[in-house]
Image (cartoon, rainbow, N blue to C red):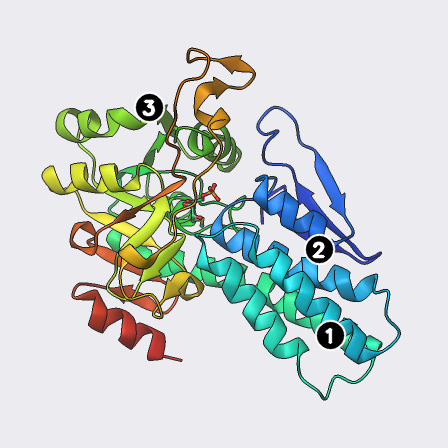
Amino acid sequence: MSSFHSVQWLDKGVVRMLDQRKLPHETIYNEYTTAEQVAEAIHDMVIRGAPAIGAAAAYGLCLVGAHTRHDSATGLQIELNEAAETLRQARPTAVNLFWAIDRMMNRLNDPALDSIEALQAAALAEAKAIAAEDVAINKQIGRNAMPLVPDGATIIHHCNTGSLATVDYGTALGIIRMAHEEGKNVFALVDETRPRLQGGRLTAYELQQYGVPFQVIVDGASGHFMRVKGVDLCVVGADRVAANGDTANKIGTYNLAVVAHENGVPFYVAAPTTTIDLATPTGDEIEIEERPALEVTTVGTWQITPDDTPVGNPAFDVTPAKYITAIISEKGVAYPPFEKSLAALMANE
Ligand code: MRU
């Protein structure tokens, strides 16, 4: 386990989250008591990363139960459904958010839950299961990936996909961590990941703690490193994988995949099956979040552009399936053609 927790339930009816906006310089945990506060924290990126925001939303629904203003199960169920709608609006791209809320509400709309206490207990049990399963899933992704990571590999990683982006251990970063723990002598090249610098701030913070050797590089340097220094593989996470394998992930992933293709470097996506969305046929149907211009015009409090500079700031891009070597999940490794392999993977209980 990591020395920090992205999200935790405290028994006094509080959700505690590590404020990732403050890392690496300050380790501050914020406490939340309403689902609206949790939705705002997800929107403002106190917590971020697809699996982590799913777990946060699940615990957000537990807060509704813990502090309900109703005295009947029916009243609480109405309140829970309203809170679920608020949480759904927090961010649009990562499917784990919607998956976790749907899972919670499928359980909590059960008419057999006919008391406040039964709803509170069911909510907490389901949210804790989502959190515990996430950690187990991430470790299994790592185990499934180990045959693909050669001893001594140099690996490019984009964004942050570690313990901070999940409940613990991580997906793509979990693979790098596991390879290191297994003594594989891996070296990570960490894309800094403009504009919010999840790589430079968060992935570097995690890798330092795990003792994995790494360098932070600017996003535009990946092609240079592949061509001149030699890179063995790229591994990235995902916010949503469509049925045909097209993958939405942090902005810049597409560029990395194209450069990897050009240089003959294998490009792997690490994603739990909770991120695979067979209901979305292709990447074209994935909503891409547009974030505030301030993320681009400033670094910290320093404005780097002229006043009134127009900005485009998509938070994610879609990497077409043709650039993806394989998608590594806890249920196994899917290879092209992904329509077939992902459907088979998801059917596999
Ligand atoms: O905007 P963010 O920081 O939430 O984006 C995170 C990513 O794009 C991650 O790569 C993805 O969620 C996978 S995390 C295991």
Q: Which residue is mark 1?
A: 77
Q: Is residue 113 above or below residue 289?
A: below
Badge 3: residue crowd in 10 Å (few <14, some 14–19, many ≥20) = some
> Quick check: can you spot residue 5?
no
Residue toward you, 179 or 207: 207
The percent position of residue 231, horizontal first and vertical second, equals: 20, 35
The residue wearing badge 3 is 218
Q: Vertical placement of 72 versus 308: above or below?
A: below
| Amino acid, disc 2 | Ala
Answer few, some or many: residues within 10 Å of disc 2's Cα (few below 14, many 20 plus, some between 14 and 19).
many
User: What amino acid type should be assigned to the residue bearing mark 1?
Assistant: Gln
Q: Which mark is residue 92?
A: none
Q: Earlier in the sequence, mark 2 or mark 3?
A: 2
Q: Whole-Å distance between the Cαs marked 2 and 3?
A: 37 Å
Residue at 47% across, 37% down: 291
Image spot of residue 29 (x, y percent): 71, 38
Point out which mark residue 35 bears.
2
Residue type, numbered disc 3: Val
Q: Residue 140 in the image: state x and y as whole percent.
A: 42, 62
- Disc 3, ligand 1: is the CB inside 8 Å? no
The CA span between labels 3 and 1 is 48 Å
* The C terminus: image quadrant: bottom left
Disc 1 is placed on an element classified as helix
Query: Which circle, 2 or 3, is nearer the viewer?
Result: 2
Mark earlier in primary sequence (3, 1): 1
Q: Is residue 62 left or right of residue 338?
A: right
